[in-house]
Image (tube, rainbow, N blue to C red):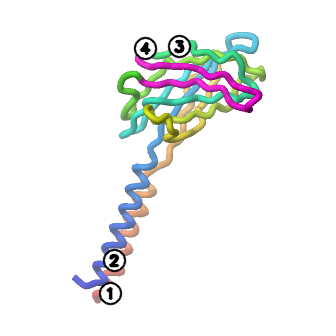
Amino acid sequence: MSSCIKRAAARALAAAAVALSAVGAANAAYIHADLTHVGGSTWDASFTVGADPGQTVEAFSVYFDWTKVSNLQVWASPGDWDNLVVQADGALASDGYYDALALADGITDTKVLGGFIARFDWADSNGPTALRFTINDPLTFAQIEQGVAALTNDGAGPTPVPEPAGWPLILAGMASLVVAGRKARELNS
C-alpha cells in the first residue's frame, strides 16, 4: 500500500473519529418545569428531570432570579432524593436555588423522573420566564453541564427541548471517507 493511500486512509479515519466523538458528546440532561399559579404571588414549579443514553443524573440545582424570588421551599420530592433550598440573597446578588441529590442510583439512560416541586413567591405576576439549571457531580458538586429548563404554565405539559442532531456529523465523516478514497484512487492511477 502506497504512502499516499495510507495518509488518505488515516485522514478519513481521523475525520470519522471526530464525527463519532462529537455525536457522543451531544448528549445532554434536561429539565422541564411545569409552573402552576397557586394564588397571589405564589407559584409551584414541578420539575421533571431526564437523562440521555449513557448518562446518569445524580445531582442537580435549579436557580431562581434573586431579584424576583422569595420564600423558596421544597414542596415535594421523590423518596430516594435529598432536597434543600437556599434562599436568594439580595445583599450578595445571589440567586436562590432548589438542590437535589440522589440517595440511590439517580436517573440513568433515557429515564425521566418527576415529583420534584418547589413552591415560591415571585415578584412578577406572570411567573418565571426562565430557570437556569446545572447538573452536578454528586461527590464534589462541581458543575458537569448547564442549561435552561423548558417552562410550561398551569399544567399544559412539558415542551420538548431540541437536542443537537448527530446524523449530520456522521454524514460529514462518511463524506470525508468518500473524498479520501477518491483521492487515493487518483494518486494510484
Q: Is residue 40 left or right of residue 28?
A: right
Tell me if residue 17 is in the magenta stretch: no
Q: CA distance from mark 4 to mark 3?
A: 9 Å
Q: Would you name the residue on which mark 2 appears?
A: 8
x and y, in percent, of residue 182 in the image: 34, 78
Q: Which mark is residue 79?
A: 4
Helix or strand or loop: what does disc 3 sit on? Answer: strand
Q: Residues within 10 Å of mark 2 (few under 14, many from 20)?
A: many
Q: Which residues are magenta?
A: 79-102
Q: Which residue is mark 3?
A: 76
Q: Amino acid at mark 3?
A: Ala
* Mark found first going from the N terminus, 3 or 1: 3
Distance from Cα at disc 4 to Cα at disc 1: 66 Å
At 72% from the left edge and 22% from the top edge, which residue is drawn? 69
Image point (46%, 35%), residue name: 140
Give the amino acid type for the residue marked by disc 2 in the picture. Ala
Q: Nearer the viewer, mark 4 or mark 1?
A: 4
**Mark 4: few/some/many CA within 10 Å (<14, 14-19, 20+):** few
